[in-house]
Every structure is written in structure tokens, then in C-alpha cells.
């Protein structure tokens, strides 16, 4: 009887679904949900998973992501980083949200991987002015993954405002002011 219970337990553990949020593969888009003590996601910061465990070397060392990061107030730099350092209090999840959208579908093959690697090598350590609608973290990582940029901020407070650029600009300024006030 003990053996039967043990076998049942082993089988149950073997078929229990596991949470996949920590199981990233090279090329996955990682979203950091920024809430700032609100009950809704204000915006998402995006990164591209390169991971030291992927056996793909694009110069990341022991870092696991590449992302567009604020170097100074309005200057951005493309740099490698660590999920745990960027995470803060955010929820972190795999967010390949365009995979099923026509025009954004990717082929999971060596040629696609090679294109992603080349895009990383072409952009690493670049600095530029941060521009919410033309140069942001989501545009960067979607360009790496799909070869073309997209900016939707799906599932966030700012998403509805992106339908109208003027309203979005106002909302982003409000969010920026709140962040500066809250974080100093």
C-alpha cells in the first residue's frame, strides 16, 4: 500500500503544471509590471532575454537581459543587466504578446535566432535621447524579437491613451511627474 501511495504521489508531481514565468529562453520579451503602490499596472518596462544559460554569447557575461535603460534623465543606453536588479518590486513575466499577431509571427529556428543576435550586436551600447513614442524600451525589444517595433503597453493604465497621441503624451507626463515626485 505504501508503494502504491508513493507511485501515485510521484505521478501527481510529474504531471502537475509548473509556473513558467522563470523559465525564459533566448529571445523572450520580459515585462516588468510597474504599479507604484497602485492597484493597477501603470506601465511595463520591457527587456529582451539573453540569459547566461542560453549558451548564446552576445557579450552579456553573467547578465540575463538587454534593455533600453535610462542613463541620465532623458538619455537612454542599450545595456545588459540582471532581471533581479531591474525587477525591484515589479512582477516579472514572459510577454511575447505579438507572437500570434499577423505580421509579427516569428519562426523558432536558427535563422531567426541569428537575426536577433545580429540586431543585438548592431545596437549594444548605443546612446540616444529617450522619446516616449519613438525610442522606448518596448519599441527596442519588439524590434529585436520581430524585426519591427511595436508600442502598445497592453494591460496597463497608459494603454488606452496610446490610441490618441496627444492624450498619451499628457498621460505620460503625468506618470513621469508622479514618478519623479514619489521617487525623488
Image: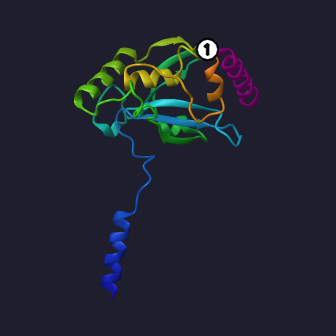
Residue 99, given in percent of the width and then of the height, sits at 40, 33
Is residue 99 inside the magenta stretch? Answer: no
Residue drawn at x 53%, y 15% is 135
Task: Work out which residue is located at the far bottom of the displayed protein and give it.
Answer: 1
Give the magenta range.
165-184
**Mark 1 surroundings within 10 Å by alpha-carbon count, few (fewer than 14), some (14 through 19), many (20 or more):** few
Between 61 and 144, the one lying in front of the other is 144
Residue 181, given in percent of the width and then of the height, sits at 76, 27
Q: Is residue 28 left or right of residue 183?
A: left
Between 15 and 160, the one lying in front of the other is 160
Relative height, residue 177 to residue 156 (above, below): above
Relative height, residue 145 to residue 129 (above, below): below
Relative height, residue 19 to residue 14 (above, below): above
Residue 26, given in percent of the width and then of the height, sits at 34, 35
Determine which quarter of the picture holds residue 41: top right
Residue 112, given in percent of the width and then of the height, sits at 28, 26
Residue drawn at x 64%, y 28% is 160
Determine which quarter of the picture holds residue 168: top right
Between 175 and 161, the one lying in front of the other is 161
Q: Quadrant of the N terminus?
A: bottom left
Secondary structure that dominates the magenta span: helix
Residue drawn at x 45%, y 13% is 126
Please name the residue that numbered disc 1 is placed on: 74
Amino acid at each position: 500500500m505504501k508503494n502504491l501511495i508513493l507511485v501515485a504521489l510521484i505521478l501527481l508531481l510529474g504531471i502537475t503544471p509548473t509556473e513558467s514565468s522563470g523559465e525564459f529562453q533566448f529571445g523572450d520579451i520580459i515585462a516588468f509590471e510597474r504599479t507604484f503602490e497602485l492597484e493597477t499596472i501603470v506601465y511595463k518596462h520591457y527587456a529582451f532575454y539573453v540569459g547566461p544559460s542560453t549558451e548564446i554569447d552576445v557579450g552579456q557575461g553573467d547578465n540575463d537581459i538587454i534593455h533600453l535603460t535610462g542613463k541620465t534623465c532623458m538619455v537612454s543606453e542599450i545595456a545588459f543587466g540582471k532581471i533581479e536588479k531591474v525587477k525591484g518590486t515589479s512582477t516579472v513575466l514572459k510577454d511575447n504578446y505579438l507572437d500570434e499577431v499577423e505580421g509579427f509571427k516569428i519562426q523558432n529556428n536558427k535563422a531567426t535566432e541569428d537575426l536577433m543576435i545580429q540586431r543585438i550586436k548592431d545596437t549594444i551600447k548605443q546612446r540616444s535621447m529617450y522619446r516616449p513614442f519613438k525610442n522606448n524600451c518596448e519599441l527596442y525589444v519588439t524590434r529585436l524579437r520581430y524585426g519591427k517595433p511595436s508600442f502598445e503597453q497592453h494591460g496597463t493604465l497608459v494603454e488606452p491613451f496610446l490610441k490618441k497621441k496627444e492624450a498619451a503624451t499628457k498621460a505620460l507626463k503625468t506618470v513621469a511627474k508622479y514618478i519623479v515626485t514619489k521617487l525623488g
